[in-house]
Image (spheres, helix red, strand yellow):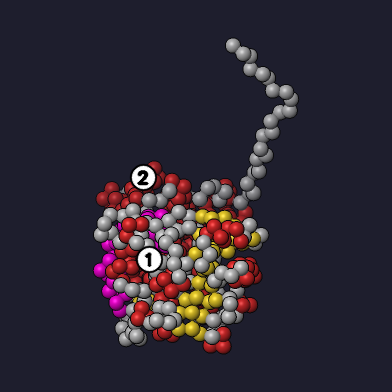
Amino acid sequence: MVSLRSLRRYTPWVHAETRQEPRILERADHRISRKNIPENTLKVLYRLHNSGKMAYLVGGAVRDLLLDRGPKDFDVGTDARPGEIRRLFRNSRIIGRRFRLAHVFFQDGIVEVATFRREPSPEDQASDGGDLLITDDNTYGTPREDAFRRDFTINALFYTISDYSVIDYVGGIEDLDARLIRVIGDPDVRFREDPVRLLRAIEFAARLGFDIEAETAAGIRRNKSEIMKASPARVSEEIVQLLQCGHAGDALQLMLDLGLLEELLPEVYDMVAADERGLGKFNRIPVVFDELVEEERELSEAGLLAALILPSVLLRRFDIEAVDGKPMRRGDLELLIDEAADGFITRFSLSRARTERTLGTLKAFMRLCEPGWTAAERRRFAVRKHFDDALLLFEIVTRATSQGDEVLALWRQAALERPEPVKVEPRRRPRGRRRRKKKR
């Protein structure tokens, strides 16, 4: 795996919380231009502003525009309450319970609009006393209060449509210049409030090429076990995003350095073990993820998750076949896959559909590895469910281990030559009068 830069200690400026006024970058002092903001987002910003409401571009979009990167999402912050937003935009809908916000719908997309929040009071939370986990986040506040309740300084910058300035309450501009990921406030409090922030800190550091500020890194180490309190669905979503960010190698190395890998992804240790046992360079799998992202390839969730689990399956298979002295039968191998993947599936509470697709990918991959296929048999198998995910997994393994190129080429050819799936027309109900049931 890619080795990581040493975590850099940074001497902080005057702490942002002691500032009475925010730092403001006037239009001439920053590089954000309205031509880089989508038209629909500008429509929302201007309608809020013209209605007498605050209208800010918030969060990651401001960060990325200041870094000359293309933002993935453009979110809007305002002092308008959800009901007011709904009345201003007839094409909107209020969503969420833990965090209520508005989605404004356009023909070609959605703009997310959130009301400024402040830190919720303890009596508003459903968690046990002493547990800082936030369970309700609908306590509205000012822009300054909203900035201080966000996760990291670089994600708490605001761009206002009223005068095109950038507003910084928390020192995010300094941290952008210093290329630092710094949690806002006390790291122990912030990570216990929302343990998913542990993973987000690592993803941002890896994706942006930033260092994690020393106190923030120490807070991750101290609170690593808190990640098990987070919603498994949110954690699995963050893991997939981390694997798809284009810097999975750096991210997993960071997780290892900060103690999160053992908590969340012990399967990655089997990648290294497979290499040590002579099964192949499976520890290069995260590097292959990054290569495929660089090539702008689409990486399915099932293919990524199956690639994480596969080394554990192969190690168990190797041990069993070493004892038995013969290859495992297909049925026994499929049972082994179910057993090897069970811990991962349970840890992340994968839905039935995601479980079925991930396991199906692993089992189909094992079929691709079997010898003796004819060209016709390959073409017929290529139309089966999970084949495309299994082919992606086969390519990941081939690129990681530098083995199997010829077989991969045969399966790719089968994918090109496979017959089109037969379209089944829905059955039409016959016309005519329905029979009336006889009254008894």
Q: Quadrant of residue 229?
A: bottom left
Visible residue check, residue 185: yes
Quadrant housing residue 184? bottom left
User: Viewed as shown, does residue 161 lie left or right of 129?
Assistant: right
152 in relation to 24, above or below: above
Q: Quadrant of the N terminus?
A: bottom left
Q: In the image shown, does 155 or 275 lie closer to the viewer?
A: 155
In which quadrant will I find the C terminus?
top right
Q: Which residue is mark 2?
A: 335
| Label 1 environment density (alpha carbons within 10 Å; few <14, some 14–19, many ≥20) | some
Q: CA distance from mark 1 to mark 2?
A: 49 Å
Instruction: Looking at the picture, tell me which residue is in the foreground, 29 or 340.
Output: 29
The residue to which callout 1 is attached is: 119
Q: Which stretch did the figure color magenta?
A: 214-239
Give amino acid for label 2: Leu
- Outermost residue to the front: 52
Residue placed most toward the observer, 130 or 241:
130
- N-term mark: 1 or 2: 1
Q: Name the front one of labels 1 and 2.
A: 1
